[in-house]
Image (spheres, helix red, strand yellow):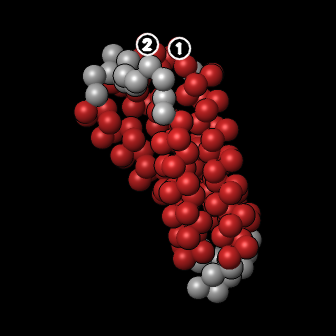
Amino acid sequence: MDKKKFTYAAIAYIVLTFAIAAGWHLVIFKDIYDQLGIFTRKEPVIPLGIASMIMQALVLSYLYPRYYRGGGILKAGLIFGALTGVLMASIAVFAEAGKQQVTSLPFWLLFESGYYLLQFSIAGVVIAKIYGKDPGSM
């Protein structure tokens, strides 16, 4: 594995995800999340969110070169992002909705799924661009 590309991909994922997640959840759509009532903690524990991003970054940066089978980087990145996004959404959107009292379940499912589609599509493309057409030897 190319350790340099792995490190760049992980760092890019963390920075990108922090910017998207903080902007989406804590600034742009904060009022919508308050109305939905799905997040019951008044103040988020930011270090736990960062720890989650670091874990995701390490796993995704490790998996991408094993996933890539050739072809266009944009397409490969979007597909990789979509696959990992669906996995994360199954946990963070659907499973959470089954455990939390949310004011509008259909809206929550669409809205938060949209967030994961955006985040992981962008992340997948960025990771793919960092690895390029030759993700390195495994």
In the shown orientation, is residue 122 left or right of residue 62? right
Residue 84 in percent (x, y) is at: 49, 56
Residue 111 in percent (x, y) is at: 48, 29
Q: Residue at x 64, y 60 (%)?
A: 10
Q: Is residue 32 above or below residue 14?
A: above
Q: In which quarter of the image is residue 67?
A: bottom right
* Residue at disc 1, secondary structure: helix
Which residue is most to the bottom? 137
Q: Can residue 127 be seen in this view?
A: no
Q: Are marks 2 and 1 in contact (CB under 8 Å)?
A: yes
* Residue at disc 2, secondary structure: helix
In the shown orientation, is residue 91 left or right of residue 85? left
* Disc sitting over residue 31 in the figure: 1
Q: How far apart are marks 2 and 1 (CA)?
A: 6 Å
Q: Which residue is drawn at 67% across and 38% down?
A: 19
Q: Is residue 92 above or below residue 80?
A: above
Instruction: Write down the residue under mark 2.
Output: 35
